[in-house]
Amino acid sequence: MSRRVPVSAGKLPQVGDRALVEFEEKSLALFNIDGELFAIDDSCPHQGASLCGGRLEGGVIQCCAHGLRFDLRSGYLLNSTLLKVASYPVEVIDGQAFIVIVSEETAL
Ligand code: FES
């Protein structure tokens, strides 16, 4: 089963910007790359630092803590598949953005 987390218009990041979206116990980082929205967990898979405040370069976010860089499209460490941050599809329906979270029970 998947859940759609609505993102209020005021929370939507402008092009090249990001926003933190809280959903139940999750903190999600939402990025706007050239008008396309990408959502990831706001927790670096290395040691858990926030990724929302990282350095954004194109579709790549660099963690502030130790500098690892992640591809926002795949969630993977740049040029590697060794480490991955959870990423979520973002749907826009009639101007309303939703982060789609698939529950772990059904993702198996
Ligand atoms: S916590 Fe992100 S690179 Fe170490």
Image: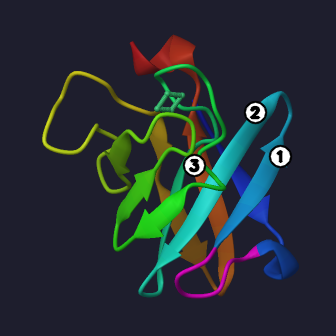
Q: Are marks 1 and 3 in contact (CB under 8 Å)?
A: no
Q: Position of residue 91 (x, y in %)?
A: 53, 66
Rate crowding at label 2 as few (under 14), some (14 to 19) or many (20 or more) other CA atoms within 10 Å.
few
Please, what secondary structure does the residue beneath circle 2 have?
strand
Q: Quadrant location of residue 24?
A: top right
In percent of width and height, residue 75 lies at 36, 42
Outermost residue, front side: 66
Residue 36: percent from left, percent from top: 44, 78
Q: Earlier in the sequence, mark 1 or mark 3?
A: 1
Question: At 72% across and 77% down in the image, what residue appears?
Answer: 12
Quarter in which the C terminus is drawn: top left
Identity of the amino acid at label 1?
A: Glu
Amino acid carrying mark 2 in the image = Lys
Q: Is mark 3 within 8 Å of ligand 1?
A: no
Q: Which residue is painted at 54% across and 12% down in the image?
A: 105
Residue position marked by numbered label 1 in the rendering: 22
Residue placed under numbered mark 2 in the picture:
26
Element carrying mark 1: strand
